[in-house]
Amino acid sequence: MAMAMGWFPTPFTRTTTSIINCTNHHPHHALDASYVKRAALLSDKSACFTSPHPNFGCVIATTGNVVGEGYLYAQGTTPAEVQAVEAAGEFCRGATAYVNMEPGDCHGDYTAVSAFIKAGITRVVIGIRHPLQHLRGKAIQSLRAEGLQVDVLGEDIRSISIEDALKSCLVVNAPLLYRSACRVPFSVLKYAMTLDGKIAATSGHASWISNKESRSRVFELRGRSDAVIVGGNTVRKDNPRLTPRHGGGHLPMRIVMSQTLDLPEVANLWDVREVPTIVATQRGARKSFQKFLASKGVEVVEFDILNPKDFVDYLYDRGYLSILWECGGTLSASAISAGVIHKVHAFVAPKIIGGKNAPSPVGELGMVEMTQALELIDLSYEQKAPSKPPHLQDVKFLSGQTNGSEHHNTPPTGTIGSDVLISGYLQPIPDLTPIIPSVDETSAIDPSISPYDAPIIFFYKTWDPYGSFSNFSPHPIRLPDENGDYVTWSSVEHYYQAHKFVGSSNPNALSYIEAIRSAKSPEEAARMGRKTQREHPDTVRADWESKKTEVMYKALKCKFSIYPHLNSMLLSTSGCILVEASPHDLFWGGGRDGEGLNYLGRLLMKLRSEFLGDDDTHKPEISARY
Ligand SMILES: NC(=O)C1=CN([C@@H]2O[C@H](COP(=O)(O)OP(=O)(O)OC[C@H]3O[C@@H](n4cnc5c(N)ncnc54)[C@H](OP(=O)(O)O)[C@@H]3O)[C@@H](O)[C@H]2O)C=CC1
Ligand SMILES: Nc1c(N[C@@H]2O[C@H](COP(=O)(O)O)[C@@H](O)[C@H]2O)[nH]c(=O)[nH]c1=O
């Protein structure tokens, strides 16, 4: 197979190392850069515990002293900026706030911006502008309009000393930047190979090449991903589990790509009690086996032709931000050729296994000359802490390259024993700021362009336009319980999940309700509610199926009544069909191809009619498709 030249989809990317052309040094710039970098590192703290989401960190400082810090734990939890302001208290007056990324404020309530303004912050230093077009520049504009000085790295502050901080900001939100620029999820290929470049013995046996420390590092990488992918042959040879066993909370989806569907009937991946599995295959492949998988609770997705490009497009549509490829060389070659792999982590073990036919990490790429080799950029090397003075070290680090790492998809903790980890990018992280204009700028260029004039409004992730319609949006609600006492719920999701157990006669129900109510994020509330329902169906209230839409409606009505800006946003959609674009949830969501029942969208439309005083019964039926 010949590889086409120029197949990387990076029309508006540039390497992070070439961003700063200007070489002036300024002492304040160095301080600014160090705090922005600190904000970036802080923002990464929730990795492994919550599903990948935009990472925000905030540091507030006065004349060289940090007075407050915070980072976003998960979608829907207290914004980093608000936490930092709360921690700094009175010290905010006249202080500077440092953030790795422009605040999103995607819910229209300008929480981060107003926290800075109210607290008396006078200057804000921002690492990168928000990568999503509908949010980019919004917070910067609002802050400047209120008289705060806003400096953006690379725009208002141009100096060589900010390069490293800027890079940290890009790396820590690399998944969002790739997603936003290339419309694909961020894909990382990870493999473990022997010193002679084999990922298994000739027999196919591969457990284990890398050592225990490296493998626990892989668990962390899994915890930072939305999905882990292997090929059919890895399932046949390894019977993998693909779970993160690092003690974090986030469990990625496990995915098998198999064209033939010639897979074993007994496999760890078919046990979906703890973690779900998707099998992607070709249309019509082994229908009886598809039925078997479905009976095990495994989701089967058919493609006309199964290939990595179409598959990542599909995962993009499903809202995935970050994918870890843990396949063998056959599928990895296919994925690299398709241009979908952005980053590589190679664990190299000091072992030699030999074998002319033993597999290697990347199969056939069709290259015949070394000049065609793909060169990785932004390299990092990691190995055991030196036990000898550097000049006697066996492994030397090339100048200008970093040893160790602190970045997204390269967890910073622990060592990897006698193995070496080499990481680098196959494609530069997109730096969007100067290339794509913001919504305001776009309208200035062409006032007829409006991104929101579609008759069907889709919503799903909370940072999307209309993301506040999601039950994961960070809008606490307060409703009376069965005794009439008011209870506060951190989100509609918390309320909904907990109410599966309200009124249940099971003695454990109360503790489940309380645990869900105290969940730190809507994601955790959802995970706890679903897991408890699956594992202890006897604790679910008997009338749940017939009452769940009523419960949801009550929570939505409360949310859209108490937040005026949400109410206005809902009413502003009058005349539009609202669809929760969840491809997974075919009851509340609309499904990938409109096959879902979209009950969340329907309830929001019903609520909108109620607020507008329309009589629903006189309206035409909303199409069954939505
Ligand atoms: N050391 C390490 O890091 C790792 C080692 N391994 C080892 O590698 C060996 C397996 O390697 P390998 O055979 O390359 O396994 P892969 O994981 O690459 O699986 C290959 C299979 O992927 C499926 N596939 C689906 N779509 C495509 C596509 N478009 N292009 C290519 N393949 C596709 C096919 O499955 P089907 O045939 O079902 O249609 C194909 O046979 C095992 O011995 C395993 O132990 C595996 C992973 C990591
Ligand atoms: N052999 C090998 C790896 N193999 C990868 O790990 C998978 C097994 O995962 P699990 O069943 O969850 O422990 C296996 O299928 C393959 O994808 N990984 C490594 O870090 N080091 C190793 O030496």
Image: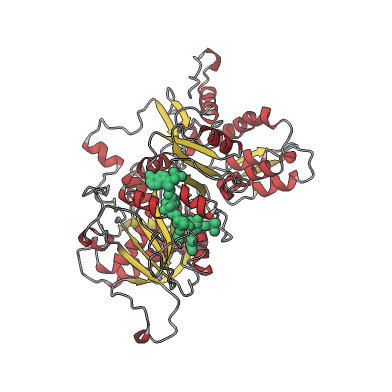
- In the drawing, does residue 181 fall left or right of residue 70? left
Q: Residue at x 39, y 33 (%)?
A: 304
How many labels, in total?
Answer: 0
Relative placement, left or right, of 251 versus 43 is: right
Q: Quadrant of residue 162?
A: bottom left
Q: What residue is shown at x 29% (from left), y 43% (from top)?
A: 438
Residue 250 at x, y = what percent? Answer: 54, 53
Image coordinates of residue 428 in percent, x first then y, are 29, 56
306 relative to 519, above or below: above
Task: Please state which of residues 454 and 349 is positioned toward the viewer in this rendering.
Answer: 349
Q: Position of residue 433 (x, y in %)?
A: 28, 51
From this viewpoint, is residue 34 visible?
Answer: yes
The front one of 572 and 249 is 249
Q: How is the image coloured?
A: secondary structure
* Quadrant hosting residue 407: bottom left
Residue at image coords 23%, 57%: 368
Q: Is residue 345 left or right of residue 591?
A: left
Q: Residue furthest top?
A: 618
